[in-house]
Image: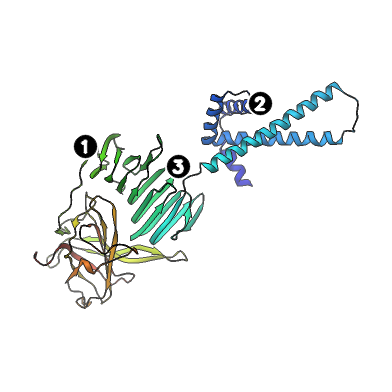
Amino acid sequence: MRGAADEREQARPSVMEKSETEERLLRYIDGTLNPTEIAALSEILKTDAGARASLRDIAEQAFVVGELGKCRVAREPIGRPSDPVREVVTKSRRKWLGVAAAAAIAVGAILFIQMRKAPFALEVVSLNGAARWSANGREESLTSGRKIPSGLIRIEGEASTLELRTADGTRFTLSGSATVEFRGLDRKEVNLEHGTLTASVAPQPQGKAMLVRTGTAEVIVLGTVFSLDATQRRTNLSVAEGQVRLKRLIDNREVEVEARQQVRASLRSTDPLEPRPIQSPSTVWHFDLSSPPEEMVGDWHAAGANEPAFISAIPSVAGRYEDGRVLVHQSVVARPSGADTFASLTSDSIMRLKLRIDRRFPLQVMIATRFPDGRFAGNFELVKEHTELAGDGAWHELEIPIGDLKPIRSGESVEMAGRQVSAVIVTTLHEPVGLCVAGISILPSPTIP
């Protein structure tokens, strides 16, 4: 009870605002507002917690006065002589009873509006990995098939994916470690703090475009298919279908991004902000370790007299147990710098790894992929103990056919040709066995050395 009272007290408007608001509310209850004024008051009540608190106060006061009046009238003897003063008081009580009824109806109408226009609901279509939802002080783990209201969603693990659907058919796919907030009344609003979001947006009502925010950009969407990859320093937007408007927050410059175009918004106003065609990356890619990679998970080590440059694995969250404990993998993650993808796959693509471990242990190799138009195309993995990795601390080279990797998400096609790689993940699962990676390459087999 105290918490509700505190919340109501915090919602109180200033003295002048309260006086003006209460005057409008009383005029509404008395029936003296015109339709235009009623519409304006309805908009105030939707967004102003102080106005709703004032309306509740009026309703409660009116109800109390009305109830007192009913009690006193009930105690009066039947057939008592007429008294002019008493008739005035009785009329006043009747008026307050009417006020109480009208106020109660108004409160009910507001609650109905709030329920009818509640933040849009989301259904979990599929989940691989760990995801948690939180809103209004509640926090829960997500599972496939779960329906949730708007709120903050966090997915954990570089290989995790979460697919969501709204009532109008809009679909969102989150991949990798990501944090996103869904909210909105009669329009959808999405805040992508970090991570990768692919959306297939159903046509939105006129004047109610979806708004997607990141740390560096705002994206306005009427109905399209697009992907966003966001960090604190930059946002990459790729549009597969339709048209999207992007505003860069550092200078509020806006650009229209057409189908099969991409654009990058950073925190530097001097950077170009020009949509460019989505280009397919080469089928040959080598991870550059000559300097610390901009996008990676792991600790970078410069080349020494007898050592190549390499990245050592670090603990990273891969999921969460039912009791809330985190599942930790020892991971190295390579991502592109300045692009969404960095390698195109063919039917005979291979991955070459140069690495070492201190003792023999199964290795997990994963890739995250996109379709050529930028849409999320699934994560693929291979978990295997390689006899070449003797656990002697020496550098060894592995050659893994991309076709040996299998989709993590059930129902995903196993055909890899045409997909593009957006991340490579190498882990030794939960065991810290001294994993170090000195080279990652993707190339067609077997013609390129």
Query: Going 79% across and 33% down the picture, which residue do you hit?
Result: 69
Name the residue at the top extreme.
Answer: 84
Give amino acid for label 1: Thr
Position above or below: 198 against 315 = above
Which residue position is annotated with label 2? 30
Element carrying mark 2: helix
Local crowd size for mark 2, using a 10 Å CA cut-off: few (<14), some (14–19), many (≥20):
few
**413 w.r.t. 263: above or below:** below
User: Which of the 4 image quarters holds residue 377?
Assistant: bottom left
Q: Residue at x 59, y 40 (%)?
A: 8
What residue is disc 1 on? 270
Q: Earlier in the sequence, mark 3 or mark 1?
A: 3
Q: Which residue is mark 3?
A: 184
Q: Secondary structure at mark 3?
A: loop
Res 409 → quadrant: bottom left
The span from disc 3 to disc 2 (Cα, nearest Å) is 33 Å
